[in-house]
């Protein structure tokens, strides 16, 4: 039977599990991975495995809250929808952001009330709006005139927040282009919302995933402030600012600390009316460094003078983000001289190549393990059974107590 714990009980249980406030110094170091090997030895079943510590998730939630006390985090469920992660974040008082009704069902199955759930996918099927409305969801993002007609038919009292376009410069995984109302779109959107008597209650944006350029938030919040003025001038009542996600974690490139990002955001939101509610949608920041993805070498080859290493998980098994250049720090149990390898997954698809010229020990052989660090976000969430390969195992521990 699936575990279900009422949301109120989860929050009430959180107090004894807070031994101290979390700070930037709580960020993990590269040497903190003995627990991964121990967990694999005790619980691993031979598949590639994501080993995740929910104690680290809770500490990350506290770090975020300490850096941005005026910003309410709503966890982006898509980053890692494991219910144990969701429960840990519920314990820390986080809200949630969803992209689908399946994510809505998952949250409600563990008792999260709908007023804590924001539906931030800007375009949805009419049936999805109807379903979410029946379940009590009130807040919906959108970014175009065409989407407004759906709300006029299905949920005329919805609280809508307009996603605007903004620069993604300096983000490792840019999101600009698919979503976001352009400057020229905003007045027609406002006019149509007024005609349909809909409530544009806020503004949101996304600066790009794994954003290493804090100035993106300054630019985007400034743009949002201008849209607030236009909404107010049109007789609407904007009262929500959603600063989105993009908060980075340490991978292979330097990243700004959450404290410095928080200070910049605090400076910018101070220019809004104090009655405006400010939320964010952190995903990667809360879960990435809480986990290590452990894969196994299934074979090596020398082809045309190039070393190839094949793992039991690749693009289709959890490492999809490598297709757009995202890189992870890797560790192994071997001590050989590091040489360049092409790294591929186990499938027969030629797309399934994760890395080229990846430096790894030259003495790696079939059966060796590779530890992909800070991989708790967008790994198992992307994994599929393409070509008949099993989904990765997920091992969840709680280092503040006993294994979950």
Image (spheres, helix red, strand yellow):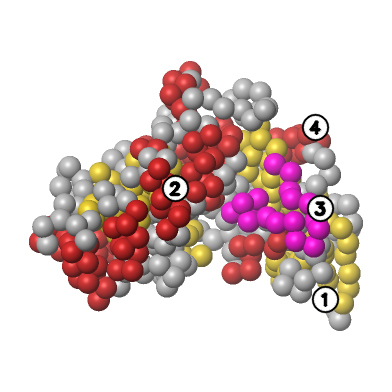
Q: Which residues are magenta?
A: 378-394
The image quadrant where one finds the N terminus is top right
Give the overall secondary structure of the magenta segment: loop
Q: Secondary structure at mark 1?
A: strand
Are the two marked residues, 4 and 3, in contact with CB atoms closer than 8 angstroms? Answer: no
Q: Position of residue 67 (x, y in %)?
A: 36, 42
The tag earlier along the polypeptide, 4 or 3, is 4
The residue at the point 72 percent across, 72 percent down is: 351
Are the two marked residues, 3 and 2, in contact with CB atoms closer than 8 angstroms? Answer: no
Mark 3 and mark 2: span between their CA atoms? 42 Å
Residue identifier under label 2: 131
Q: Secondary structure at mark 3?
A: strand
Q: Position of residue 344 (x, y in %)?
A: 77, 66
Q: Which mark is residue 42?
A: 4
Q: Closer to us: mark 3 or mark 2?
A: 2
Q: Is residue 233 left or right of residue 247?
A: left
Q: Position of residue 103 (x, y in %)?
A: 52, 46
Residue identifier under label 3: 296
Q: Closer to us: mark 2 or mark 4?
A: 2
Residue 248 in sight: yes
The tag earlier along the polypeptide, 2 or 4, is 4
The tag earlier along the polypeptide, 3 or 2, is 2
Mark 4 and mark 3: span between their CA atoms? 17 Å
Mark 1 and mark 3: span between their CA atoms? 20 Å
Q: Is residue 49 left or right of residue 70?
A: right
Q: Secondary structure at mark 4?
A: helix
Q: Nearer the viewer, residue 84 or 209?
A: 84
Residue identifier under label 1: 306
Q: Is residue 244 left or right of residue 16?
A: left
Count of labels shown? 4
Residue 25 in sight: no
Q: Label 3: how many residues lie within 10 Å, few (<14), some (14-19) or many (20+)? A: many
């Amino acid at each position: 039977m699936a575990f279900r714990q009422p949301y109120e009980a989860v929050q009430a249980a959180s107090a004894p599990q807070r031994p101290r406030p979390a700070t930037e110094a709580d960020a993990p170091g590269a040497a903190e991975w003995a627990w991964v090997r121990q967990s694999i030895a005790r619980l691993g079943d031979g598949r590639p495995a994501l080993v995740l510590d929910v104690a680290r998730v809770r500490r990350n939630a506290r770090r975020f809250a300490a850096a941005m006390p005026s910003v309410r985090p709503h966890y982006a469920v898509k980053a890692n929808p494991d219910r144990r992660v969701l429960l840990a974040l519920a314990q820390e008082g986080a809200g949630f952001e969803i992209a689908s009704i399946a994510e809505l069902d998952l949250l409600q199955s563990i008792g999260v009330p709908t007023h804590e759930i924001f539906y931030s996918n800007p375009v949805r099927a009419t049936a999805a709006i109807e379903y979410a409305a029946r379940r009590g969801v009130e807040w919906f993002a959108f970014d175009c005139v065409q989407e407004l007609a759906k709300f006029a038919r299905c949920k005329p009292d919805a609280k809508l927040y307009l996603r605007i376009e903004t620069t993604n410069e300096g983000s490792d995984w840019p999101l600009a282009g698919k979503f976001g109302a352009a400057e020229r779109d905003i007045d027609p959107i406002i006019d149509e919302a007024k005609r349909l008597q809909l409530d544009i209650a806020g503004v949101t944006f996304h600066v790009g995933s794994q954003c290493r350029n804090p100035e993106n938030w300054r630019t985007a919040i400034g743009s949002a402030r201008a849209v607030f003025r236009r909404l107010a001038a049109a007789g609407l009542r904007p009262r929500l600012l959603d600063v989105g996600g993009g908060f980075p974690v340490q991978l292979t490139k330097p990243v700004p600390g959450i404290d410095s990002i928080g200070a910049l955001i605090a400076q910018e939101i101070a220019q809004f009316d104090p009655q405006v509610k400010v939320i964010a949608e952190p995903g990667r920041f809360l879960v990435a460094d809480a986990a290590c993805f452990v894969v196994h070498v299934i074979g090596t080859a020398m082809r045309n003078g190039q070393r190839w290493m094949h793992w039991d998980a690749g693009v289709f098994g959890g490492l999809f983000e490598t297709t757009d250049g995202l890189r992870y720090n890797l560790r192994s149990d071997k001590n050989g001289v590091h040489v360049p390898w092409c790294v591929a997954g186990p499938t027969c698809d030629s797309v399934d190549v994760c890395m080229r010229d990846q430096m790894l020990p030259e003495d790696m052989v079939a059966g060796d393990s590779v530890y992909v660090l800070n991989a708790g976000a967008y790994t198992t969430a992307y994994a599929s059974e393409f070509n008949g390969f099993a989904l990765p195992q997920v091992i969840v521990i709680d280092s503040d107590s006993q294994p979950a």
